[in-house]
Image (spheres, grey):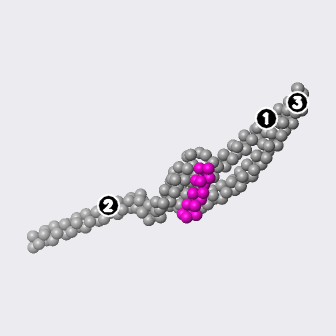
Amino acid sequence: MAEDAAQALGSQVQRRNRLALGIVIVALLGAGAAVGWKLFGAKLLGRSVPLAAMQGVESGLAELRKDDTASKAAAEKALAGLVKTYPAYVGAHAGLVTALTLQLDDLQQRAKRLDKAAEDRNFRITQFNKEKPADWDNRAAALAAEVVALKKDYDPLVAAARELEVRLREAYKAMQVAASQGNGLDRQSELALI
């Protein structure tokens, strides 16, 4: 009987140890799964971006790197098409916002150059009227004609810049909406949202 009691006690200790070991193993596996889910779960369940969309954005950004007016317009057109096709893809929105921003900057710079040139000519006209050098009236009239021509170039640029600024604001708002519904942003998208 003493042997049976000792044997029963030994088997009870073994069962308890096996149960405790099982619980520790399950806890470790659970902790590992929780860490893995935290790191990769959202990416695994999240909507993946189609390869065509990523390639389209890269192609549009490559066009922007050419840094000429025609390439920027082509990039805007391509990226706007991607935004329509993949409205949830924040990268496409960010590319479009970038393209529109660069185009707006170009228009504003050209308008500033024309404004500066007109200002310069007006200053020279004022000096001719004060100093009255030889043939000052013809020279002032020629400069006044140049100012009128510059104004004709300036006004359409300013109107185009205003229209582009409206489109840029709309694209930015659409990007913010897509970002608020998205599963994470890439670096370019984060920078565009600033």
Residues in magenta, as a range: 70-87
Q: Label 1: which residue?
A: 120
- Residue type at mark 2 is Leu
- Residue type at mark 3 is Trp
Badge 2 crowding class, 10 Å Cα cut-off, few under 14, some 14 to 19, many 20 or more, is: few
- Residue type at mark 1 is Asp
Q: Residue 106 at what x, y percent from top left?
A: 66, 46
Who is closer to the viewer here, 63 or 1?
Answer: 63
Select label 3 or label 2 by which is in front. 3
Q: Label 2: which residue?
A: 28
Q: Main secondary structure of the magenta part?
A: helix
Q: Residue 102 at what x, y percent from top left?
A: 62, 48
Who is closer to the viewer here, 6 or 48?
Answer: 48
Q: Label 3: which residue?
A: 136
Which numbered disc flags the more N-terminal residue, 3 or 1?
1
Can residue 181 be seen from the camera position used here?
no
Residue under the image location 63 percent in, 48 percent down: 69
